[in-house]
Image: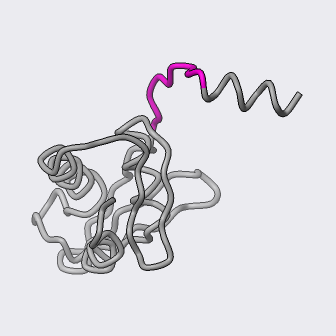
Amino acid sequence: AWVNFTEICNLMKRSADHVTQFVLAEFGTEGSIAGDGQLILRGAYKEKHAESLLRKYIKEFVTCEMCKSANTNLARDSSTRLHMVTCHNCGASRTAASIKSGYHAVTRADRRAAKQKA
């Protein structure tokens, strides 16, 4: 469990849903946010992996590339369906890459779930 997950999201001024989507896609796992703000992940992960993942998220979706400020806003443009990072300090804006989920191997649990649905 990632105990201070919602606190980190609030500090970055990003929605917990977006950060959760990124973390789950990068780790290639399933998870959810508990009632007390913890991110519950399926599987065991080391603290250093979560730290490097958070650094990657900040680099891609928080930091302004022009002035390196973290005082930015992330908004989704509905017409282009892209995320725009807009800096409040220098006024620069850029598009952020969409979250891509990687390969997900079909596990025994997936097969059982599919079998029970049928």
Quadrant of residue 44 in the image? top left
Q: Position of residue 98 (x, y in %)?
A: 45, 44
Q: Quadrant of residue 8?
A: bottom left
Residue 101 position (above or below residue 32): above
Q: Residue at x 43, y 79 (%)?
A: 36
Nearest the eye: 79 or 99: 99
Q: Give the vertical position of 43 relative to 58 (above or below).
A: above
Where residue 83 appears, as percent x and y from the top left, is: 46, 56
Q: Residue at x 80, y 24 (%)?
A: 115
Question: In the rendered view, would you say 44 is above or below 79?
Answer: above
Q: Is 28 on the left or on the right of 71, as rendered? A: right
Predominant secondary structure in magenta?
loop
Residue at (38, 69) in percent of width and height: 38
Residue 113 relative to residue 75: left or right: right
Residue 103's spot in the image, x, y percent? 47, 22
- The answer to whether residue 84 is magenta is no
Front-most of 28 and 81? 28
Where in the figure is residue 76, as x and y percent of width and height?
52, 62
* Quadrant, the C terminus: top right
In the image, which residues are magenta? 100-108
Rendered-image quadrant of the N terminus: bottom left
Q: Is residue 86 left or right of residue 70?
A: right
Q: Which of 92/42 is in front?
A: 42
**Residue shown at 43%/44% (left/top)?**
42
| Between 95 and 43, the one nearer to me in the picture | 43
